[in-house]
Image: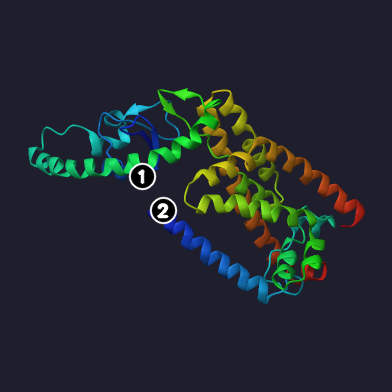
Amino acid sequence: MMRKCGVWICVVIAAVVAIGFYYRYDPSHTLWTPKCVMLGLTGYKCPGCGTQRMFYHLLHGHFLTAISYNYFAALLTPYLFILATTYLAPQSGYTQWVRRHLATKWAAYSYGILFILWWFLRNLLGL
Amino acid sequence: MYYYINSAGQQAGPIAADQLAANGVTGETLVWKAGMSQWTKAAQVAELQSFFAPQPQQPSYQPQNQAYRPQNQAYQPQNQGYQPQNQAYQPQTQSYQPQNMGGVQKKPDNNMVLAVVSTICCCLPLGAYSIYCAAQVDGAFRGGKYDDAVEWSEKAKKWAIWSIVLGLIGNIIYMFTYGAGVLSQL
């Protein structure tokens, strides 16, 4: 239980720092956010490109602008959020149910396929 | 972190090794943790020797131990009050839960969150392998290969973390190398 408390404190601190940071700094105009190595070296976007800008605009309430930076990440965010909270919440029938249905091999395979599809599509269609 | 079979005959845990005794585990209780091939009596687990091995050479230690027992027993009813909740959930899953040494096994976590984060943030092949490992957990578990499932689960976690760490290091090197040049490409 002590361990869970520690994890909780770390997660809350990390979340507050991250939200503060991405609220204050637009990743398009600062050097202090990670830049995509693949985009820089090859000119092709990786599937994660735009995620930071998405969060920046999400935090400023520009919902449509936000998801336009990375539709894939916009889809993933609620999924990851729901799944991640089941690790922080006390164990119950609900957390078991969520994990049994969301963290399955089908989720993993679908994710892999969507990841590759999105990778090609965004570079071909300029998304 | 150990799992153990409680007085009601059900799997409980995971809890840290030094918490076992406080939860009613004795040298005779079956315990298990990731990496162990089967449920084993606590007294026979090398790592738990200091907690559960009989210590006839230290009689002065014994009374202390016995004074501690009643506390343990006071804790049990609490535990049993909690069981019905659990049991409402069991029947659904028992159709595919393999039995291992009498204890009901829980499916190991497939660490999807870490695996997904590692692929989206770091774009490394290691992250893809982590996703692959995560996908193997279900199959191994339903096939009754609990140890394999645990192994895939740990692999998924390990490679996701490596992917994130290498991704961060790569990114830092890249930023220092290209600096402002990167900014203009945004």
For the C terminus of chain B, which image quadrant?
Answer: bottom right
Residue B161 x %, y %: 58, 48
- Residue at (83%, 44%) from the top-left corner? A117
Q: Report the disc number at residue A1.
A: none
For marks 2 and 1, give the CA distance.
Answer: 9 Å
Residue A49 x %, y %: 77, 58
Q: Residue furthest left?
A: B60
Asked if residue B111 can be seen in this view, the reply is: no
Q: Residue furthest right?
A: A125
Tell if the residue under mark 2 belongs to the same chain as the one under mark 1.
Answer: no
Viewer-nearest residue: B98 or B36: B98
- Mark 1 falls within which chain? B
What type is the residue that disc 2 sits on? Arg
- Residue at (61%, 73%) from the top-left corner? A20
What type is the residue that disc 1 sits on? Ala
- Mark 2 falls within which chain? A
For the N terminus of chain B, which image quadrant?
Answer: top left
Residue labelled with disc 2: A3
Number of residues whose C-alpha sits closer than 10 Å to that of mark 1, classed few (under 14), some (14–19) or many (20 or more): few
Residue A87 x %, y %: 52, 50
Residue labelled with disc 1: B16
- Residue at (12%, 32%) from the top-left corner? B56
Asked if residue B115 can be seen in this view, the reply is: yes
